[in-house]
Image (cartoon, rainbow, N blue to C red):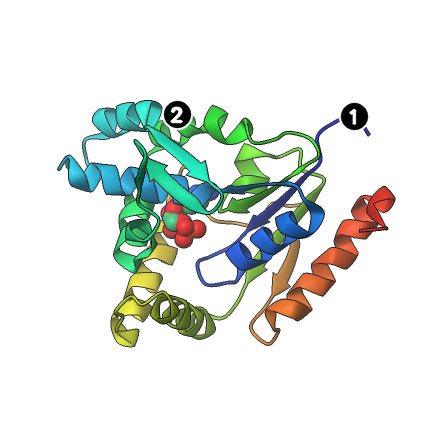
Amino acid sequence: MNEIRIITVDGPSGSGKGTLAQRLAAHLKWHFLDSGAIYRVLGLMVDRVDISVDSVGKIAELARSMPLSFDGERALLSGEDVTGEIRTETAGNQASKVAAIPEVRTALLAWQRDYAKPPGLVADGRDMGTVVFPQAQLKIFLTASPEERAKRRYKQLKEKGLGVNLAGLIEEIRERDERDSQRTAAPLKAAEDALTLDSTQLSIDEVFSQVVGKVHETFPDLSGI
Ligand code: C5P
């Protein structure tokens, strides 16, 4: 197999896709792309320089020139660690506003595709399997009920020490899901050749072992891992 090995993990927020993708990448010792973090940092920049979310041209320009880098899990903006700041639900909502702009998505395509390097890539997002890496050999679409996803996000944010209100969180998640699935540019949806898994009743370990089984079917020479 000459082409680069790619596994895409897409789905709505709180489905567990971030945890799954990170764990898979660590397990396989492959590269990892957290595409949501890119949109979150862009949303933060738009807030900081105080441009309206309607200024499409300016935002696309920012996306093209964004001084963003990753150091493991840390997101650095001109060297400043913004990891904590981009993880709030408000930052997620702001990210989904800038992510709806087609010019922004085009500006970020090459950046994301650069992550596809040997020995392989696990890419986490909304459009990894449909738009960014349609050639991926294994595509997972992870879902869970909206209530379960809100509960998980609540727990995750609490653990990070961020103040959250469950009712407000449910509303923000609902709003974000709707924007992500209704937009015309790369809406949140499963690729036709994706394996859809509903994690509502499953623990992360159960999801992980099902997906590892699929990884071994897809890449039989990895069986020793
Ligand atoms: O995955 P995460 O919650 O960090 O993503 C934040 C937002 O960024 C999403 O709600 C979505 O609007 C946007 N996003 C996207 N395409 C991706 C990843 C994230 O539009 N591939």
What's the mark number on residue 2?
A: 1
Query: Could you say where residue 205 lies in the image, as x and y percent from the top left?
Result: 65, 69
| Residue at the spot 34% in from the left edge and 63% down from the top edge | 174
Residue at screen point 49% across, 24% down? 110
The answer to whether residue 10 shows anywhere in this view is yes
Above or below for 138 versus 116: below
Q: In the figure, is residue 3 to the left or right of 77? A: right
Name the quarter where the N terminus is drawn.
top right
Q: Position of residue 46 (x, y in %)?
A: 21, 37
Mark 2, ligand 1, within 8 Å: the answer is no
Residue at point 29%, 26% (across, down): 60
Disc 1 within 8 angstroms of ligand 1 (CB): no
67 and 94: which is toward the camera? 67
Residue, disc 2: 107
- Which amino acid, mark 1? Asn
Q: Which mark is residue 91?
A: none
**x and y, in percent, of residue 36 in the image:** 42, 45
Q: What SS does tag 1 mark?
A: loop
Toward which corner of the image does residue 58 lie, by quadrant? Answer: top left
User: Which is more foreground, mark 1 or mark 2?
Assistant: 1
What residue is rendered at 30% in x and 59% in y?
Answer: 89
